[in-house]
Image: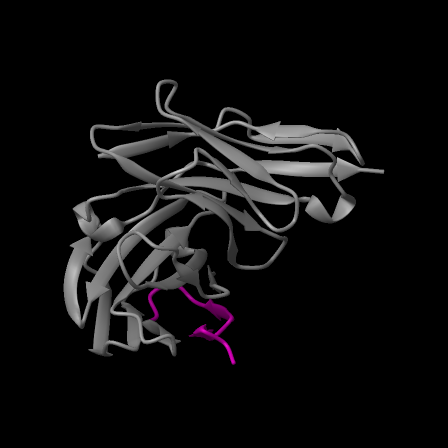
Amino acid sequence: AQSVTQLDSQVPVFEEAPVELRCNYSSSVSVYLFWYVQYPNQGLQLLLKYLSGSTLVESINGFEAEFNKSQTSFHLRKPSVHISDTAEYFCAVTSNSGGSNYKLTFGKGTLLTVNP
Amino acid sequence: DTAVSQTPKYLVTQMGNDKSIKCEQNLGHDTMYWYKQDSKKFLKIMFSYNNKELIINETVPNRFSPKSPDKAHLNLHINSLELGDSAVYFCASRQGQGTSYTFGSGTRLTVV
């Protein structure tokens, strides 16, 4: 079984400031890791994912996350945020061996609010 | 063309009623899921189907009954609706080993 802990339920920042959203996971097996974003009253969109290979993964809109196996973390970072980045961010994990049919286990989400 | 479509988008109904939410994916994926997002935004899996076969049933009350007539459709029927069923229900599909899910836009169910 897996679990995900997102340490901050809310993160307020000013526009153009850097931000880090923290995610730690627990699993007895090797995992795939994901960050999803949910804009107000919308569905879930994949932001980025770690499957294998380079531990640093990037999205097309400037976010990046680094898989740290020893610290069981997958923190999300952006060097300069925009007001349009205001959204709920979810970290998720699944077994990479097909256990439980690759069901996603989500963290409780972090609300990122970018203020002018 | 919407990859994973859910209908209806909003559903308001009274306690005790029976309702259905429909989900269709045009991606050719073999696996489909239902997730529930509660009022605190917490997302939890409910069901998973693989080629019309139920794979996961996560301690969901038996008032909830998924039905998959073919691998492109996964519907969710809920009997005797309760106030606590109010939530956003997301359908999703997946193909391949642990690759990305594609989520629908959600159905906001409000039980009054």
**Residue at the front extreme?**
A53
Q: Check the picture and name the quadrant holding the C terminus of chain A.
A: top right
Quadrant containing the N terminus of chain A is: top left
Left or right: where does residue B88 sit relative to residue B23? right
Please, is residue B111 above or below residue A113 in the view? below
Query: Which residue sits at x=49%, y=68%?
Result: B12
Corner quadrant of residue B3 = bottom left
Residue A66's place in the image compared with B36, above or below, is above
What residue lies at 22% left-to-right and 73% top-to-bottom?
B67
**Left or right: residue B9 compared with residue A34:** right
Residue B7 is covered by the magenta coloring:
yes
Q: Nearer the viewer, residue A109 or B78?
A: A109
Magenta-drawn segment = B1-17
Q: Nearer the viewer, residue B88 or A61?
A: A61
The residue lying at 34 percent from left, 55 percent from top is B99
Q: Position of residue B42 (x, y in %)?
A: 44, 42
Figure quadrant of residue B27? bottom left
Q: Tell me, what colour scheme is on the image?
A: one colour
Residue A92: give x, y in percent of width and height: 40, 41
